[in-house]
Image (cartoon, grey):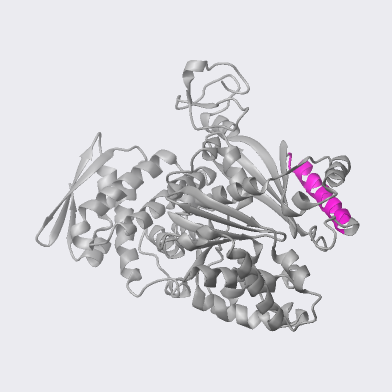
């Protein structure tokens, strides 16, 4: 029912989605417009119902503490709305006696109080706080947890090594379209290795050495930085030899890097190679690009490392240890390179909270889930989006004899079709350009960087062929030489599909294309008057002929 009046009954609702445990299912009214005494429209009620809960997730690691604030939506989706990170170095100097040091504890208490203040100010209804390797191994764990509870009002749950590895796996598997993977997650106090095949976790291991602990272990030997790095590589390789299953990996397995050190590596690489995208998730780094970066950093002293652009000052002293771990792992499993994931433990928790079914099995269609999240978040007309997607798919399939694109480009067209109108969140005029920008800068899962760029420029063509040469050239390193023609063809298909739902009424139900000589005859299946839609679609005739070298007729 409406929150302000009681004019709807249970029969007016349908149950949708999957909801967090302990929450009641929520439905949305089928009625086209709410006419209750409160004066609210269906859209307003939908916006109220859509946001179910705001939660805070705190991840207390050996090196840093992170808070993310997340909106959970009623139909199993979520969106991060705020974040805070502090370097606390909780696991520093633990190797000597196994105790968390008073100075580190005090810094952690100070940080968690800040986190709690931000949660309260943001009206967070629930905080999920987890601690990992440093607290897991600490001999003074109990007193530390009690102090956090008393001083900050936060109850920390210490994850087991298996729970931590599982959350990391869920964060990766629900955001990446990599069927066979070996995950390397480098923390401050431990390194997790997870092997999965066909979206099933097969093996995992947690080695009690991370970027902080490995740095501490080799910092007092008086060796030069390069010799120190070699010792770290040798030491970590010996740890890997104890994992027999690492020698039995599927030959098609792909290495996936998770954690702050991998994200920092992306920032450095982005500046070195002038990479055009700011998106770390799904960034592909060949081994031949990684080794020069490692060779450059491992010989520098701390003062010089702090001057490297892209390297955060608080990570400068421990990054060489993390890179030594990566070098050892890449060499040991003979990986040609790795993909960097921007998702890990915290995202694993988010998915389990928003969509509890992911506890049992991962999302089957990562890309569509991600796109649907953005469609809802950007407030797009979902019926119009669905109709344009369906018409775009029909056009792609029926014009295949002309464009000859492999199926992978249907994926690009689907992204562009689902988000073609998201730019109207900024303003209607020239919204195709705003849509292009938003696609380039949104969090998209299960999609390569090249596919993101192609989809963004395809969406930019849904009103007219609107590709600026300067903007296009910015992404030359991501694109192929013939991609401009691909985008123009996909763009005109999207423009026709969008035009055939010009009134947002679903009048045009289907399309049948006949290719006769120098013409393409599009026969529309309609319910009602489709003159507006056909007229709008015919305005693409000149661009269609330019792209496909055929005249366009629409009946």
- Direction from residue 139 to residue 279 in the image, left or right: left
Q: Is residue 9 above or below residue 16?
A: above
Q: Residue furthest right?
A: 102
Residue visible at 25% across and 61% down? Answer: 544
Residue 293 lies, in percent from the top left, at 59, 79
**Where residue 200 sits in the image (x, y, percent)?**
47, 47
Left or right: residue 62 versus residue 485 is right
Reply above or below: 252 against 304. above
Report the residue at 68% width, 84% height from top.
299
Q: Is residue 319 magenta?
A: no
**Image coords of residue 105 (percent x, y):** 86, 54
- Image quarter for residue 214? bottom right
* Side (left or right) of 37 relative to 399: right
Percent position of residue 335, x then y? 48, 69
Q: Toward which corner of the image does residue 269 lie, by quadrant? A: bottom right
Residue 120 sits inside the magenta stretch:
yes
Whether residue 288 is visible: yes
> Magenta: predominant secondary structure element?
helix
Quadrant for the N terminus in the image: top right
Find the magenta span and give its range.
Answer: 104-123
């Amino acid at each position: 029912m409406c929150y302000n009046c009681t004019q709807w009954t249970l029969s007016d609702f349908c149950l949708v989605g999957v909801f967090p445990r302990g929450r009641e299912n929520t439905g949305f009214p089928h009625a086209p417009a709410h006419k209750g005494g409160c004066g609210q429209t269906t859209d307003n009620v939908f916006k109220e119902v859509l946001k179910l809960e705001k939660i805070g997730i705190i991840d207390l690691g050996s090196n840093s503490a992170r808070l993310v604030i997340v909106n959970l939506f009623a139909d199993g989706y979520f969106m991060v709305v705020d974040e805070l990170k502090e370097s606390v170095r909780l696991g520093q100097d633990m190797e000597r006696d196994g105790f968390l040091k008073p100075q580190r504890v005090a810094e952690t208490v100070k940080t968690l109080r800040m986190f709690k203040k931000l949660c309260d100010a943001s009206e967070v209804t629930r905080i999920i706080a987890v601690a990992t390797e440093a607290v897991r191994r600490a001999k003074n764990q109990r007193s530390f947890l009690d102090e956090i509870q008393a001083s900050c009002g936060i109850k920390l749950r210490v994850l087991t090594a298996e729970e931590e590895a599982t959350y990391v796996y869920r964060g990766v598997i629900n955001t990446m379209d990599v069927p066979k993977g070996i995950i390397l997650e480098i923390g401050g106090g431990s390194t997790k290795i997870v092997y999965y095949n066909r979206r099933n976790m097969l093996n995992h291991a947690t080695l009690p050495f991370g970027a902080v602990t490995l740095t501490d272990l080799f910092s007092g030997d008086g060796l030069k930085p390069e010799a120190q790095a070699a010792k770290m590589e040798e030491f970590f390789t010996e740890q890997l030899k104890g994992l027999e299953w690492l020698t039995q990996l599927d030959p098609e397995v792909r290495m996936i890097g998770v954690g702050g050190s991998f994200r920092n590596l992306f920032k450095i690489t982005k500046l070195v190679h002038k990479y055009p995208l700011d998106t770390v998730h799904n960034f592909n780094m060949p081994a031949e690009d990684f080794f020069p970066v490692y060779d450059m950093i491992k010989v520098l002293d701390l003062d010089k490392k702090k001057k490297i652009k892209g390297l955060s000052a608080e990570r400068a002293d421990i990054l060489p240890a993390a890179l030594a771990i990566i070098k050892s792992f890449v060499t040991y499993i003979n990986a040609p390179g790795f993909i960097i994931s921007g998702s890990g433990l915290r995202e694993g928790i988010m998915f389990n909270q928003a969509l509890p079914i992911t506890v049992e099995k991962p999302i089957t269609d990562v890309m569509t889930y991600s796109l649907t999240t953005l469609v809802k978040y950007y407030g797009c007309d979902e019926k119009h989006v669905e109709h344009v997607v369906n018409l775009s798919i029909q056009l792609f399939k029926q014009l295949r004899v002309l464009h000859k694109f492999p199926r992978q480009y249907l994926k690009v067209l689907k992204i562009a079709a689902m988000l073609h109108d998201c730019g109207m969140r900024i303003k209607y005029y020239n919204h195709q350009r705003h849509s292009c920008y938003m696609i380039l800068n949104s969090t998209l899962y299960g999609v390569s960087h090249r596919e993101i760029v192609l989809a963004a420029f395809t969406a930019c063509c849904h009103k007219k062929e609107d590709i600026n040469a300067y903007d296009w050239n910015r992404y030359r390193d991501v694109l192929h030489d013939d991609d401009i023609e691909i985008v123009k063809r996909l763009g005109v298909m999207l423009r026709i599909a969008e035009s055939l739902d010009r009134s947002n009424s679903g009048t045009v139900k289907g399309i049948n294309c006949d290719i006769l000589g120098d013409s393409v005859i599009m026969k529309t299946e309609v319910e009602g008057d489709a003159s507006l839609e056909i007229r709008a679609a015919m305005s693409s005739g000149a661009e269609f002929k330019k792209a496909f070298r055929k005249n366009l007729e629409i009946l």
